[in-house]
Image (cartoon, coloured by chain):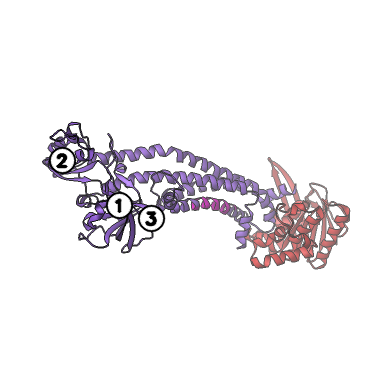
Amino acid sequence: MKHLKFIFSLYSKNWLSAILLIFVTSVSLFTLTNAIGKYQFYHYSLDLFSSTKLNDHDVYFMPFVSEDQRKDPESNYLSMEQATSNAVQQIKNTAGVEAVIQSPFLISGEYKGNSLLMAIYDRELNEKFSLPLETGTWFRNTAKTKNAEAIAGGYSFQNVQVGSAIHVEYKKGNGITKEIDLKIVGKLKDPSAFPNFSLSGTTIFADDIWKWQDVLILNQKNLPDDVGKDAQVSGSNFFISIRSQANYDAAVRSIEQFGTVKPYRKILSDSSINAENKIRQNLPIPLFFLFISSMTQLSVSVLFVNKKIPEFGIYYLYGCTKFRYFCSLMICITALALVSVLINFVMVVECPALLHYGILNLGHVVFDCRQIFSFVLPYEIISLLCSILFCFSIFRKKTPIELYRRLES
Amino acid sequence: MITLEHIYKIYYSHGVEFQALKDVSLTISDGDFIAIQGKSGAGKSTLLHILGGIDDYDTGTYRFNDTNVADFTNHQLAKLRNSEIGFVLQDFSLINHKSVLFNAMLPLYFNKTPAKDMKPMALNALRLARIEDQAKKPANQLSGGQRQRVAIARAIINNPSVILADEPTGSLDTETSAQIMDLLMSLNKQGITLVVVTHDNTVAGYAHRIITLRDGEILS
């Protein structure tokens, strides 16, 4: 205890520089963590996309309904939904097309005061877009039951256990509040996402086909009949599953008359390139911050040692060895670095809550404590070792007798 | 008991050799009070540094309580300085921004004294040095005489057998000097060996024995 007290006493006259070091290092480490978090997000969305049951002869489809397609045989003008529905029907009838996988239908609801979305999975989504689970199992029961099965994802459900029943409220189209009891059979891995095919464009990346939000995924087959009636379609695009590679070219040629096709394999390769590009774009800022942080670490350490060297002359007289004093000073400096790492660790652990409540807005990131051990800690150890070596080179030149004489004079 | 036999010390500065001590032999008995005098550069401080184990010597033998100090490791030397020797310096050598109490208990941080005993021991040492009432003040708010009392309290906290004082009254007025010397004398009467380096003949007058150094050699 007294040794700690002595070490703590060495911070005197160095508080400002200590606080500055903690601040600069914490900000720099968090910038690094954030950049890695963004990179991990792109990889996670790519992994999520790869984990689907889609295969090389499936395509993402962005329909384009022409003026002609919006008219029925009697030349009556159709609504866009109706025209799209007709196009979907025609695509389904195209030779070689096995299935059309549409975005899940959504219902807005509320659970314990938190608004959430319920995404209804139909047979095609269940077959192709079963998602990786943290715990529990994907839907098994296909019979209609009182407590429909649900898979929960997101911070709102962090305390909900698999196997427990939850009560969710939602509003019907006529404004009447309805309630539904659900049984949680599985929990999605964080960050939670569900398929949402709403983005159109010349380049589609893996992260574009997911909606990143707290969600309850429901199985259509397992739901009471009236629930599905209040659901709304969440995206106008869809995936088309083509029966086999042999049918691929002909089927794609046929369906291209209804819109634009983006092959599954192309989305995968574009997403990989995109993830690498994003890290290249995002990395310079954290690297700059880390450079500033390393320089601050070095400067503060040297300042610390230089300010405390004269006092060593006094401590030496009363039994403090050179080795012990240097170690005490280095423990002081190491403690400052550890505080920064600890702040970073707390930020990473608390980030889901901070993001959920809107206290932080970092865009899409995947934080993970492994980042601390893989990047933050090694950086901090190297930076600290450099500072310690530099301080040692200064300290070793000072002999106690020289310091004592300086003290006397 | 301290014994020095044929101690030689040479300094090298920018390639120039300087003989600080030449064939110094000296015996200091327990409870002795010795004043070391001499002109600047005579080797007084060097002798005191060697006695305190903060500087080494080139040849000769230094025995502290019949143990050859040359055989001591750094750790043993540190232990010797901590438990057997107390230092009192002209400029007081206090950690000025720290409290009087912290300064007094400083040597206890470097030995095995339990943390709970540190404060009572420091207060006791401050009481013996008659500065207990200033314990909570920062050292830089004290007068010169008060600071030297704190330095003496720090020197005696571990009950050393020897106090080495380098110009202990050098920065003090005559009245305060007398008070500090009275304090040191009272410690000597309790059995602590005193070795004082001084230019001041009044201070030297308190000593049982005066050693005069000239060009590194003992004259008398």
What is the CA distance from the residue labelled 1 to the residue labelled 3?
Answer: 22 Å
Which residue is pictured at 56% across the width and 50% down the height? A333
Residue B171 sits above or below residue B159 on the image: above
**Horizontal and vertical percent for residue A302?**
59, 45
The subunit carrying tag 1 is A
Instruction: Examine the structure image and report whether residue A298 is included in the region drawn in magenta.
Output: no
The subunit carrying tag 3 is A
Earlier sequence position, callout 1 versus callout 3:
3
Query: Which tint is chain A?
Result: purple
Residue B83 sits above or below residue A368 on the image: below
State whether residue A397 appears in this view: no
Chain in red colour? B
In the picture of the structure, the residue carrying the numbered disc 2 is A91
In the picture of the structure, the residue carrying the numbered disc 1 is A172
Q: What's the residue type where badge 1 is placed? A: Lys
The subunit carrying tag 2 is A
Tag in front: 2 or 1: 1
What is the CA distance from the residue labelled 3 to the residue labelled 2?
Answer: 39 Å
In the picture of the structure, the residue carrying the numbered disc 3 is A156
Pick the residue in front: B163 or A111. A111
What is the CA distance from the residue labelled 2 to the residue labelled 1?
Answer: 32 Å
Pick the residue in front: A109 or B182. A109
Q: What element carries label 1?
A: loop
Magenta region: A329-342
